[in-house]
Structure formats: C-alpha cells, structure tokens
C-alpha cells in the first residue's frame, strides 16, 4: 500500500481542483432549467472515470436523469464492490445566505464550501480517487469495482429501482458501499450498519356536513378536532410506548454487543437537549436516547389541521380534521404490516359521531447489515488504518430506500461508509466538506479495497 498512499498524499492539491470543477456544475435535479447541467455533470463524471482507468463507462438513460456506470473487473476470484453515489444536488437558494458563491468551491480553514461538497459529489469523488491511486501506481485493483452514480437522488430516486431491476445482471456484486452519510462526530470515525424504515399514514375525521357556528351548535355535536386530538393522545402510554396492539411483535432486540458499542460513543443527553432548546428529553422508557433514535420503532404526528387558523377570531365548529402520522420501523418490522395494525387500531378507537378515512401514503423497509459480516469488519479495519484510530458503530434513524432495494433485488448487503459530519449543512446554505475527512476518506477506501479480500471467503462479502 505504500505506493498507493504516497500517490494520494502527493496529489491532494490536484484532487481539490478536480473536485472544484465537479462542484462548479449546478446539477440541480429539481430545476427543469438545469437539465443541460445535469447532462454536463454526467459527461464530466464519465470522462473523468475513463481518465483514471475505469472501463466500460456508460451514460445510461432512464425515464428521468441518466445514470453514470463504469467498472473495473480484472481481478478474477476477488470480491466485487458496487459503489453507489449521486451527482445531483439540492437547490442553492437562498443565495444571500451563502458566505461564498454556492457553485464556486471555496476553502476556509479545514473546510471546502460548495453545494454538493458533502451531499454527495465530494463523498462519491472519494471512491474515484481511491481507484485512481491503485490504477495509476499498480495498474490494477485488489478487488473488482462497479460504479452506479445516479442523477435523481434529491428528487426521490424515482427511476432507480426500475433501473436496478432491468440491469440486475450488470450490477451483480458481493457488497455495496455508499458514502452519503455522516460520521458520528468530528474526530470520531464510525461505521453505520442499520437504517430505520417508514410507514406514513394520513387520517381524516368528518363530523357535521358543514362548518357550524360554535355558539349555536357547540355542545350538541362532537368536534372533529377534539376527537382527532384524543385519538392521537391515545397512541402512546405514559411510558412512551406505542399502544397499537402487535406494534412491537417483530422488533429485533438489540444485542449486548450493540448496546455496549453505543455506550462507547461520545454522547451527552444534556448537551443534546440544550442544543435542541428543550428542558427534557422524551421517549420509550428502558432505552438510552441513541437506542431510541436508532434501534427502536417510533410513532410521530407530523402534522394536524382543521377549522379556522387565520388571523383574528372565527367561532367555527369545523366539519373536518386531519393528521399525518409516521412510524419509523426497525428490523424485522414490515411497513405493510405496520400500516395494517395502525389502521385496525385507529378504527377501534375512533369515537361515534365522526366518519373516519385512512390512507397509507408511503412505506419503506428497515435495513441492517450484521456487524459480524465481512463487509462491516473490513470497513472497520479500513477506517482504523485511514484515520489512525479505532472506529465506533452506529445506526441512523432515517431511511435510505436504495439500501433496501439493493438487498431485495441484488440480494447483497450495504456498508454505509460516510465521511460527512452532522453539521455540514447538506441541504442548506454554506454546505461544506471537512477536508481531513475527504483525504482520510480516500485513504480509507483504498485500505478497504486492499483488506476486503482477506475478510471474504470465495470472493463473497
């Protein structure tokens, strides 16, 4: 690895210039006026992949923005790594909140500021530079590598699942690696091995057939807002547990190893509460805050509306009230089952005097890669070599749907090897990438390619 690491260290200035050129392309997928920029960004990536020695590079159309694919498959018997990333970015507005122009990469102290620096151009670029270091020094990689870089992640990856299904043979691999997330904290390298799923519901209650005068009718009919509020209040007990029967039946318990690993993370409930401006934390009793955030299911009311909410007073008894409610799910829960249990329970607790309707708006499955798996163990080894300290384990409370799709369609696990930081303003003004993480990430990925075959059997991760 000496020549590979020396090459990385000798080319840091060039890496920054190249990344700056990539970040200068305003590939905003939500903006119809940026379609040409999306295409230009895909072309830039394809050209750069060819220059570093990636083979079979293609810009592949979808019903939306194109996918950039490339591979290097000249390591027979070695495992194959599928690297996923995205080249589209969020809109930069409000522009006046940026300290420097969003599409002009600017270094201030140890950070590189630009839209897409962290999410996800910068982190995807890390993998390209690691591949380059091997191919330019050794002419070969110790593993086979495939790249799948899409242009629609920021608009929900609408066409990605179809693309993966149609090209499953082309994308066949032993392990997926994604760098589109964060380390636990600055100076704390960590590996994310689990994500929560989601079941998103909407309920509506209808009482009288029209809005009524609260003076003339109040006290004679049930107010839908009151009924809805009472129903939502019944969804948790005094210990913070969800009261839906069967909700916890399929929840995978935390192992002793996992609970011990979380305790090693530098975490303070007091600081967390202070940063959020709350006087006390809340949640299911019997679990730490990190356990509740990552490994326990939750139910939240995301929005509630009905009646008069304008300025001034209007004495109305409303006809309707509605709410949106999401359930974050953990292995081995199912979004379809959670939605059914929710609907059954809501129907049971709905009072007489209102008509109830329930809709399931969205569902996504939880994902987990066992920490004993070859891919995670190799990533832990690579992180320690890349950053010079032993990494820690973490999960994420949110969802990354493509991880579930890779598991479902390609039958392979994903290692979330994030090099961002939680405070890098990924979707806001002054987005940045911490440069020690950028260069440490390149070294880490190079080490991952180097050590992965040692952790696999028969080339399988």
Image (spheres, grey):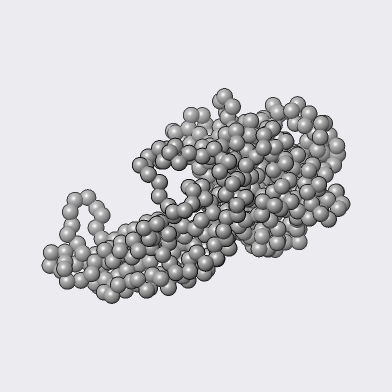
Total numbered labels placed on residues in the image: 0
Q: Nearer the viewer, residue 88 or 338?
A: 338
Measured from the top left, where is residue 404 in percent x and y?
62, 59
Q: Residue at x 47, y 71 (%)?
A: 340
Q: Residue at x 74, y 51 (%)?
A: 374
Q: Is residue 315 left or right of residue 74?
A: left
Looking at the image, is 173 positioned above or below residue 249? above
In the current view of this chain or complex, which residue is farthest to the top? Answer: 109
Looking at the image, is 374 positioned above or below residue 343? above
Q: Nearer the viewer, residue 85 or 260?
A: 260
In the current view of this chain or complex, which residue is farthest to the left? Answer: 216
Measured from the top left, where is residue 253 in percent x and y?
57, 58
Looking at the image, is 312 positioned above or below residue 113? below
Residue 208 appears in the rendering: yes
Q: Is residue 102 left or right of residue 277?
A: right
Residue 149 appears in the rendering: no
Q: Residue at x 48, y 69 (%)?
A: 246
Measured from the top left, where is residue 337 in percent x and y?
52, 69
Q: Residue at x 24, y 58 (%)?
A: 308
Measured from the top left, where is residue 222 in percent x and y?
23, 69
Q: Picture quarter containing residue 367?
A: bottom right
Q: Is residue 257 left or right of residue 167?
A: left
Q: Nearer the viewer, residue 11 or 370?
A: 370
Looking at the image, is 38 positioned above or below residue 299? above
Q: Picture quarter containing residue 41?
A: top right
Q: Quadrant of the N terminus?
A: top right
Q: Nearer the viewer, residue 69 or 140?
A: 140
């Amino acid at each position: 690895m000496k020549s590979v690491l020396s090459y990385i260290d000798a080319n840091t200035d060039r890496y920054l210039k190249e990344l700056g050129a990539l970040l200068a392309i305003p590939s905003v997928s939500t903006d119809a006026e940026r379609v040409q920029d999306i295409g230009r960004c895909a072309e830039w990536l394809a050209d750069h992949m060819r220059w570093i020695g990636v083979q079979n590079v293609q810009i592949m159309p979808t019903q939306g923005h194109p996918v950039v694919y490339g591979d290097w498959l000249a390591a027979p018997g070695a495992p194959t790594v599928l690297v996923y990333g995205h080249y589209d970015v969020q809109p930069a507005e409000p522009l006046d909140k940026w300290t420097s122009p969003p599409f002009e990469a600017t270094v201030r102290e140890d950070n590189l500021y630009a839209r897409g620096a962290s999410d996800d151009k910068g982190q995807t670029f890390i993998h390209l530079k690691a591949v380059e270091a091997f191919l330019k020094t050794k002419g070969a990689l110790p593993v086979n590598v495939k790249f799948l870089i899409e242009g629609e992640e920021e608009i929900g990856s609408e066409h990605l699942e179809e693309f993966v299904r149609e090209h499953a043979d082309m994308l066949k691999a032993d392990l997926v690696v994604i760098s589109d997330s964060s380390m636990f904290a600055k100076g704390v390298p960590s590996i994310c091995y689990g994500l929560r799923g989601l079941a998103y519901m909407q309920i509506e209650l209808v009482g009288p057939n029209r809005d009524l005068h609260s003076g003339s009718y109040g006290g004679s009919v049930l107010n839908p807002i009151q009924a809805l509020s009472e129903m939502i209040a019944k969804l948790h007990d005094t210990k913070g547990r969800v009261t839906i029967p069967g909700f916890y039946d399929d929840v995978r318990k935390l192992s002793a190893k996992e609970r011990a690993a979380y305790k090693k993370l530098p975490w303070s409930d007091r600081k967390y509460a202070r940063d959020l401006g709350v006087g006390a934390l809340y949640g299911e009793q019997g679990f730490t805050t990190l356990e509740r955030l990552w490994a326990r299911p939750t139910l939240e009311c995301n929005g509630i509306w009905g009646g008069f909410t304008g300025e001034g007073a209007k004495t109305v008894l409303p006809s309707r009230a509605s709410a949106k409610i999401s359930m974050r799910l953990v292995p081995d829960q199912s979004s379809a089952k959670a939605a059914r249990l929710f609907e059954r329970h809501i129907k049971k607790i709905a009072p007489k005097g209102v008509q109830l309707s329930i809709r399931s708006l969205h569902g996504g499955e939880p994902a987990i890669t066992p920490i004993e798996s070859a891919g995670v163990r190799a990533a832990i080894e690579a992180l320690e070599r890349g950053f010079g300290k032993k990494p820690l384990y973490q999960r994420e409370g949110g969802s990354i749907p493509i991880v579930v799709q890779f598991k479902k369609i390609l039958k392979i696990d994903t290692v979330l090897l994030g090099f961002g930081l939680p405070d890098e303003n990924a979707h806001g003004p002054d987005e940045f990438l911490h440069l020690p993480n950028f260069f440490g990430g390149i070294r880490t990925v190079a080490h991952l390619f180097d050590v992965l075959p040692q952790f696999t059997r028969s080339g399988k991760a």
